[in-house]
Amino acid sequence: MDFGTIVALVIAGLGFLYTIFRDSSSDTEDLLTRVSQIEAKIQLHSSSIDRLETEQDEMKKTLCNLEDQIHQLDLKIERILTILEKTKGA
């Protein structure tokens, strides 16, 4: 082995030891910050989904009421038409 190879191995070894023993608290803090942001977004989205589900249920009830009212109006119009046809024919 020549001198260049030994120096390269020593530098590689030191780099490897540095990556193992370096202070990774900043990485941990960054990850914790990102996780807390994601958790906050999840809570916000869950809240939004719950609110939308509630609004959808209310809209379904309103739609059913409107359908009933339209049906009642349709029956009344049929009665009026029947009365008009009878009076016209008489």
Image (cartoon, helix red, strand yellow):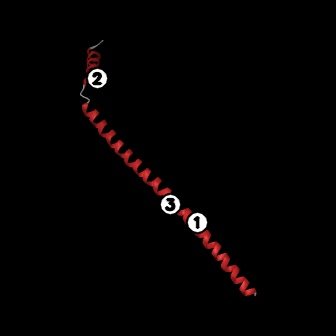
Residue 67 is labelled as 1
Label 1, residues with CA under 10 Å away: few <14, some 14-19, many ≥20:
few
Q: Which amino acid does label 3 sit on?
A: Met
Residue 59's tag is 3
Tell me the CA gap for discs 2 and 3.
59 Å
Q: Nearer the viewer, mark 2 or mark 1?
A: 1
Picture quarter with the N terminus? top left
Crowdedness of circle 2 by 10 Å Cα count: few (<14), some, many (20+)? few
Q: Give the total number of marks visible in the rendering.
A: 3
Label 3 to label 1: alpha-carbon separation: 12 Å
- The residue singled out by tag 2 in the image is 20
Upstream in the sequence, badge 2 or badge 3?
2
Q: Looking at the picture, how far across and down is residue 38, in whole percent?
A: 36, 42
Circles 3 and 1, Cβ within 8 Å, touching? The answer is: no
- Looking at the image, which residue is at 24% across and 26% down? 22
Query: Observer-nearest residue: 82 or 38?
Result: 82
Snapshot quadrant of residue 2: top left
